[in-house]
């Protein structure tokens, strides 16, 4: 069984704990530190567990070697030194502060093709010390037989994990989508999992790295259309802002996205580390735009969607205190006509992404509507 801690907020708590005392720039820099640079022993008490057969995952990694690449990408631009040629014609839309120009990230990703994976899922929920906890497990067949009657994928879904996690947490979604004829791309965002990068940007730089990744996949014929971004928490906000910025994406599926970064960080502090003075965190959050070198509104998903609305499916947990339903509804209201919001009354932030029996019909209906007629 793998322990994924707080599922989407845990390692942000680590950043808050290590922020220590107040100088605002120090707190801002600590919040931007790569989550995979923190020691694993410092992880908070877990609320969500994901169990699976390790040997099956290892087989998937071996199988995926044939369709997996890494490359150095920063500010939306591929850099020399990776295994593929430098894309001289791909430039960022604006220049970021030097920390990212000098901090190229080696982005790790895997392509999971459609197949009959025979996916089965189980879930257990319980209350411990007044907190909801959950354990999720899944099993699948690897290697999997081809999906009957499917000549080519219905399209491509890029799966984006939560803060402090990695692409393995999105494996159940990859298999679930694969059974329904969709190809998935599992990504370790910069500073997460097997990807490098000393800092994260909470959106602006990651957006451009995903843009460059899609450019590479399309250039090698590995991204059949339509392309949809599906993300969880931090990954959900990236899915929304990336879809808003890149016309090659058809739509987004956002599970528990936050509308304002500062509010989400404060909600994490209040829920997991209420003893940390809120004034320290507010001061650090106010410095983030300056440290990143971007306008303040670029860090707020709601501002991004109001400027460039997109079609999106939003999913929220009724007991979510990190991304409350009202905040998710505000995002839906700022999106294009036809966007939808679905709320699971009894779910919290950490458990929501694994509530497959409840969410599957909603997401499957959205995906069916996105398929091209010829497929």
Image: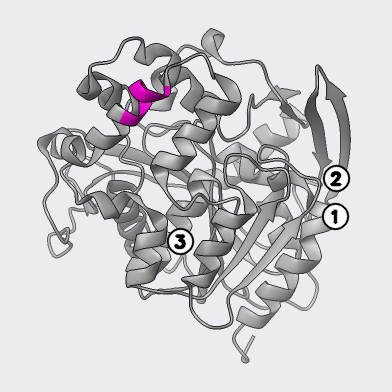
What residue appears at the point 74 percent right and 45 percent down from the top-left corner? 354
Category of crowding for the residue at label 1, using alpha-carbon neighbours closer than 10 angstroms: few (below 14), some (14–19), many (at least 20)? few
Judged from the image, the secondary structure of the residue bearing numbered disc 3 is helix
The CA distance from mark 3 to mark 2 is 27 Å
- Which comes sooner in the sequence, label 2 or label 1? 2
Would residue 197 be visible to someone looking at this image? Answer: no
Q: Would you say 56 lies left or right of 25 here?
A: right
Q: Would you say 175 lies left or right of 76 here?
A: right
Judged from the image, the secondary structure of the residue bearing numbered disc 1 is helix
Prevailing SS of the magenta stretch:
helix
Q: Which residue is mark 3?
A: 240
Taking the magenta stretch, the answer to whether it contains residue 280 is: yes
> Which dot marks residue 261?
none
Tell which residue pokes out farthest to the bottom in this image: 373
Q: Would you say 137 lies left or right of 6 here?
A: right
Q: Would you say 294 lies left or right of 321 here?
A: left
- Which comes sooner in the sequence, label 3 or label 2? 2
Residue 170 x, y percent position in the rendering: 63, 45
What residue appears at the point 68 percent right and 35 percent down from the top-left corner? 57
Mark 3 touches mark 2? (CB < 8 Å)? no
> Which dot marks residue 357?
1
Mark 2 touches mark 1? (CB < 8 Å)? yes
Q: Which residue is mark 2?
A: 121
The CA distance from mark 2 to mark 1 is 9 Å
Would residue 80 be visible to someone looking at this image? Answer: yes
For the magenta stretch, what is the residue range? 278-282
């Amino acid at each position: 069984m793998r322990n994924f801690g707080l599922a989407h907020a845990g390692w942000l708590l680590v950043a808050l704990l290590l922020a220590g005392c107040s100088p605002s720039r120090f707190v801002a820099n600590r919040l931007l530190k790569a989550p995979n640079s923190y020691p694993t022993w410092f992880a908070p008490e877990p609320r969500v567990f994901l169990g699976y057969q390790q040997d099956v995952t290892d087989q998937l990694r071996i199988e995926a070697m044939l369709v997996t690449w890494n490359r150095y990408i920063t500010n939306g631009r591929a850099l020399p030194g990776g295994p593929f040629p430098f894309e001289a014609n791909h430039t960022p839309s604006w220049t970021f502060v030097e920390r990212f120009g000098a901090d190229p990230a080696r982005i790790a990703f895997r392509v999971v093709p459609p197949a009959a994976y025979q996916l089965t899922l189980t879930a257990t929920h319980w209350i411990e010390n007044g907190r909801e906890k959950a354990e999720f497990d899944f099993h699948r067949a690897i290697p999997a037989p081809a999906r009957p009657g499917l000549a080519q994928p219905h399209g491509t879904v890029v799966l984006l994990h939560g803060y402090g996690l990695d692409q393995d947490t999105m494996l159940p979604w990859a298999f679930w989508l694969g059974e329904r004829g969709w190809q998935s791309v599992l990504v370790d965002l910069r500073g997460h999992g097997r990807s490098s990068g000393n800092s994260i940007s909470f959106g602006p730089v990651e957006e451009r790295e995903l843009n460059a990744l899609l450019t590479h996949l399309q250039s090698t014929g590995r991204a059949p259309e339509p392309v949809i971004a599906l993300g969880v928490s931090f990954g959900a906000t990236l899915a929304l802002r990336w879809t808003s910025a890149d016309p090659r994406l058809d739509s987004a599926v956002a599970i528990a996205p936050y509308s304002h970064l500062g509010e989400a960080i404060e909600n994490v502090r209040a829920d997991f580390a209420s003893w940390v003075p809120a004034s320290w965190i507010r001061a650090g959050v106010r410095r983030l735009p300056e440290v990143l070198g971007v306008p303040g509104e670029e860090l707020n998903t709601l501002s991004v969607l109001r400027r460039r609305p997109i079609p999106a499916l939003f999913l929220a947990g009724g007991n979510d205190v990190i991304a409350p339903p009202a905040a998710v509804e505000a995002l839906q209201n700022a999106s294009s006509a036809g966007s939808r919001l679905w709320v699971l009354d009894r779910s919290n932030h950490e458990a929501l992404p694994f509530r497959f029996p409840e969410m599957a019909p909603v997401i499957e209906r959205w995906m069916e509507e996105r398929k091209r007629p010829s497929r």
